[in-house]
Image (spheres, rainbow, N blue to C red):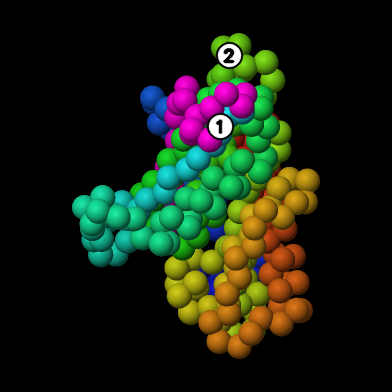
Amino acid sequence: MRPSGRRADQLREISLVPGYAKYAEGSCLARFGDTHVLCTASLDERVPPFLRNTGKGWVTAEYGMLPRSTHTRTDREAAKGRQSGRTQEIQRLIGRSLRSVCDLTALGERQFKIDCDVLQADGGTRTAAITGAWVALRLACDRLLSEKQIARHPVSGQVAAVSCGIISGAALLDLDYAEDSTAHADANFVLTADGGVIEVQATAEADPITEGQFQALFALARKGIGELLALQRAALGG
């Protein structure tokens, strides 16, 4: 029995609240159980130097955890003067995930900066961030299209992410912190609505992951992400 009482293939209670931030072009508060991540999309009419005069746009991401998003306070990375390797890895993952389902030419020479701020952490912050960030970006691009700043929608696909793990030999979906901290293996899956795989991050903490176990994790991820994709569509009004 899982500490939460959930079935092995059951997501935490998920809530995607669109338009949560008043001033951002697009926003979404992603709640995966007790993990809460505020995702905002901000328009910048400039592109990075390597894209100037190419006619293409860009989507980039920043990720951070608030000092009291965990049980004890952690210093802001800005106060330390540098980002941790974990932070850099996660924000690059978010950016890659979103760009994989975007037509950057349709965006023109402008970029969206996605901010994913962890308000409360209980496992799976990166997967919640990716899932909520897609909603925020989609809303921001809807706005550009409605204002006729662009001729066609830049978001060409749908993407979501979820974590899975193995505890006492059992494959489990959407780990919370209590499970993640004791898992023998854990994996993050980033998948698209048409079945594409953007990234899989899998790590064994004890014995290596067997092929059968990996297939079980992948099957759970596909099921969970299918449900997350439906929730994203519902958050956008169907």
Label disc, if present, on residue 149 of the rendered structure: 2
Quarter that holds the C terminus: top right
**Residues packed near mark 1 inside 10 Å, few (<14), some (14 to 19) or many (20 plus):** some
Instruction: Choose between 77 and 23: the one closer to the eye.
Output: 77
Q: Position of residue 105 (x, y in %)?
A: 66, 27
* Residue under the point 76% across and 79% down: 212
Residue 226 vertical position relative to residue 112 in the rendered view, above or below? below
Q: Earlier in the sequence, mark 1 or mark 2?
A: 1
* Residue under the point 51% across and 51% down: 92
Kind of residue at disc 1: Leu
Q: Position of residue 205 (x, y in %)?
A: 53, 82
SS class of the residue under badge 1? Answer: helix
- State which quadrant residue 203 falls in: bottom right
Q: Residue 223, can we see it?
A: no
Q: Position of residue 134 (x, y in %)?
A: 58, 40
Q: Which residues are magenta?
A: 33-55
Q: Is residue 156 left or right of residue 14?
A: right
Label disc, if present, on residue 51 of the rendered structure: 1
* Residue under the point 75% across and 51% down: 196
**Residues packed near mark 2 inside 10 Å, few (<14), some (14 to 19) or many (20 plus):** few
* Residue under the point 64% across and 31% down: 104
